[in-house]
């Protein structure tokens, strides 16, 4: 080897860059140690370098042709394939020519571009990310802010590269925790993450998650700080919307049941710790269903919104106004007093204000409607130790009180009292008993005579009696409302009609003509299949419908009056007679009487009880009798208990039928037959 080349070998041997020296024939003359690391140990120096123009391509680079070019200094980026290894290294070739011993040689330096490409790829990834990112050097100066970070901060890359990350934090970031704790976390744990507020400008402010990571070398020297900034405005907006849906009523914007239950629990805790009292008002609008059914749900929604607008100013900021569902509202009032009597007076006074605010006329679309409310009041904690205060119980107690206010006619308040719990328990017992009752074993049909002025039995009303094996005799006044509410009345009413049809058929066949009256519950009447069930019972029992009177209350006409009229007309076409029971106590209207094909009016016993002697009741009874006479309708007066009542009624209308204890108590069928049917039959045969 020439002396000059030997000297060159000594020079390039220890260099970190990979170097190859080619002779004038463009054959490798020497390589340094850095280059040999890329070669196979058994590879001959004269073997051609495996260079490709593309990373995944198979086209070999013409190194010989490249070296033959006349240009002294050449640069070329290629991929070096390492023999026996599936690895290609990005390299940059730089050619330099020099003369040694009058011979032109080529010195080629191969720069490993792996790190540069990785950094370029990292920068592209950073700029492709929607998250703002930056990297600092060891002194904390921002060296690599990506596009998103520049956009979030409103600062250019040049501006950011002129400041440290600490300077940026102090300039634009507001933390929810002390700044010292963030720096301490970075030093101790090499990372910190939390919610911050970014003040890019007066107009551009947003919430974000900022994550800071500290990279250190093996000697604990800081090499880089990496920051990641993510805008969470959309996330917070979504959380707010979810919270709104979860805790607030969509129509009115008021708190919903979930939220007010949570606040009741908090008030209970405060009351227990401070020995004070809270008050819950349960509000239910009177007549809302009629407004909703008459004018439509949109009108009902308008009314609810207007009621909300009336209540909000009264409630203020300390109390909570909530809408449960439908037309039910609640007001929760914490109270600072430790005197229950003071809390009671405050509750009653505020309840009156709520009533006055709601009791008004409302303009709904093109209509003006009146609405009022029934309000139940529950002051808690409940005094009795056995009544553990919980939000669901407090709501239940206030609801019970509201129901009592509704029963008393509405537009009033009612204060919860312990007796309501006992009534609720009894009601629950009745519901359970009804659900498990055996009709044929526990229920009986009784009959009460309806007589003419001579005392002869013309017809009989069917009455239901329940003899429960454990509860004993249960009054119809108690169990029928419960059965109607739970819809057990549909099954019970069908059973009553079946038994009454069979009895009417038997008496009319065996003895003389007698008419049987059967009460029909509004719940039963409004069943979609009611007419079909009646027809089915007629066919099964073979009863003559002309011997049956079906008694309906005025209330059946309030709900879907058009369909109710069609059903009544259908019943009449089948041969049944129809009576309006308890006439005068409901929504009496001459207009619907003109349309209804009815046969009879029953004067309610509440009007009979005070005649003769009560001028108002006398006038009502007289008006009903005159109305029936004008319409050619039969009259039945129920609740007749004295001779004076009987004489008064007969004087007003000789054709009136009288029903009451004066003539007959309700009796089982066999006893009724012995007392009111057989004697008349024997009299007829004697005559």
Image (spheres, rainbow, N blue to C red):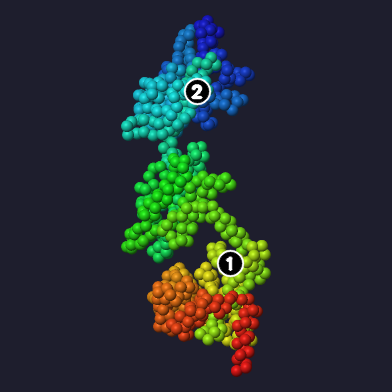
**Screen quadrant of the C terminus:** bottom right
Residue highlighted by disc 2: 185
Which element is circle 1 on? Answer: loop
Q: Residue 659: give x, y in percent of width and height.
A: 53, 78
Say which residue appears at 64% left-offset and 79% top-offset.
Answer: 671
Q: How many marks?
A: 2
Residue highlighted by disc 1: 475
Q: Residue 556: give x, y in percent of width and height.
A: 47, 70
Whether the residues at callouts 2 and 1 have beta carbons within 8 Å, the answer is no
Residue closest to the eye, 531 or 200: 531
User: From mark 2 to mark 1, how far is it between C-alphas?
Assistant: 76 Å
Point out the residue furthest to the top here. 3
Q: Residue 262: give x, y in percent of width and height.
A: 49, 43
Look at the picture and state if 662 lies above or below 354: below
Say which residue appears at 53% left-offset and 73% top-offset.
Answer: 520
Residue closest to the eye, 368 or 563: 368
Left or right: residue 504 versus residue 626 is right
Say which residue appears at 45% left-offset and 31% top-offset.
Answer: 195
- Disc 1 packing (10 Å; few <14; some 14–19; many ≥20): few
């Amino acid at each position: 080897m020439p002396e000059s080349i030997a000297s060159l070998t000594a020079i390039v041997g220890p260099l970190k860059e990979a170097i190859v020296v080619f002779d004038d024939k463009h054959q490798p003359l020497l390589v340094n140690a850095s280059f040999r690391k890329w070669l196979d140990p058994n590879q001959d120096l004269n073997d051609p370098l495996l260079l490709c123009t593309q990373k995944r391509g198979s086209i070999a680079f013409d190194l010989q042709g490249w070296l033959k070019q006349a240009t002294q200094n050449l640069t070329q980026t290629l991929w070096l394939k390492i023999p026996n290894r599936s690895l290609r290294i990005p390299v940059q070739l730089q050619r330099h020519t020099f003369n040694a011993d009058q011979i032109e040689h080529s010195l080629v330096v191969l720069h490993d571009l792996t790190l540069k490409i990785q950094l370029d790829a990292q920068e592209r990834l950073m700029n492709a990310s929607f998250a703002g990112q930056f990297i600092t050097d060891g002194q904390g100066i921002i060296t690599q802010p990506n596009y998103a970070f520049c956009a979030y901060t409103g600062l250019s890359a040049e501006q950011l590269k002129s400041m440290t990350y600490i300077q940026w934090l102090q300039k634009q970031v507001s933390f929810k925790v002390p700044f010292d704790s963030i720096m301490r976390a970075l030093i101790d744990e090499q990372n910190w993450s939390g919610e911050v507020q970014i003040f890019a400008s007066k107009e551009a402010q947003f919430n974000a998650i900022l994550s800071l990571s500290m990279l250190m070398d093996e000697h604990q020297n800081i090499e880089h700080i990496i920051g990641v900034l993510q805008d969470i405005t959309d996330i917070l907006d979504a959380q707010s919307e979810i919270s709104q849906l979860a805790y607030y009523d969509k129509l009115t914007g008021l708190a919903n049941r979930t939220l007010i239950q949570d606040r009741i629990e908090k008030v209970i805790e405060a009351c227990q710790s401070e020995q004070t009292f809270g008050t819950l008002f349960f509000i239910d609008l009177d007549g809302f269903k009629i407004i909703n059914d008459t004018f439509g749900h949109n009108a009902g929604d308008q009314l609810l919104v207007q009621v909300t607008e009336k209540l909000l100013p009264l409630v203020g900021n300390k109390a909570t106004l909530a809408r449960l569902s439908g037309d039910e509202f609640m007001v929760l009032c914490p109270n600072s007093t430790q005197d229950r009597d003071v809390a009671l007076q405050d509750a009653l006074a505020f309840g009156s204000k709520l009533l006055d605010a709601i009791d008004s006329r409302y303009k709904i679309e093109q209509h003006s409607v009146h609405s009022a409310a029934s309000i139940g009041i529950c002051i808690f904690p409940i005094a009795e130790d056995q009544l553990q205060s919980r939000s669901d119980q407090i709501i239940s107690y206030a609801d019970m009180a509201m129901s009592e206010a509704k029963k008393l006619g509405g537009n009033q308040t009612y204060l919860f009292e312990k007796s309501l719990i006992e009534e609720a328990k009894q009601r629950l017992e009745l519901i359970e008993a009804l659900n498990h009752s055996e009709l044929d074993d526990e229920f009986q049909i009784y009959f009460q005579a309806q007589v003419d002025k001579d005392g002869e039995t013309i017809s009989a009303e069917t009455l239901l009696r329940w003899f429960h094996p454990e509860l004993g005799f249960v009054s119809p006044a108690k169990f029928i409302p419960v059965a109607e509410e739970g819809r057990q009345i549909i099954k019970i009413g069908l059973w009553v009609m079946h038994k009454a049809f069979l009895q009417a058929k038997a008496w009319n066949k065996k003895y003389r003509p007698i008419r049987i009256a059967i009460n029909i519950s509004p719940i039963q009447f409004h069943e979609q299949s009611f007419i079909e069930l009646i027809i089915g019972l007629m066919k099964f029992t073979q009863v003559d419908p002309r011997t049956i009177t079906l008694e309906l209350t005025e209330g059946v006409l309030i709900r879907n009056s058009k369909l109710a009229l069609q059903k009544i007309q259908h019943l009449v076409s089948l041969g049944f007679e129809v009576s309006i029971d308890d006439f005068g106590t409901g929504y009496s209207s001459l207009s619907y009487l003109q349309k209804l094909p009815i046969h009879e009016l029953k004067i309610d016993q509440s009007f009979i009880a005070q005649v003769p002697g009560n001028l108002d009741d006398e006038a009502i009874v007289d008006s009903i009798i005159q109305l029936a006479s004008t319409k050619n309708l039969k009259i039945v007066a129920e609740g007749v208990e004295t001779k004076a009542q009987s004489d008064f009624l007969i004087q007003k209308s000789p054709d009136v039928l009288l029903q009451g204890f004066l003539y007959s108590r309700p009796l089982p069928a066999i006893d009724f037959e012995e007392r009111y049917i057989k004697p008349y039959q024997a009299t007829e045969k004697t005559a």
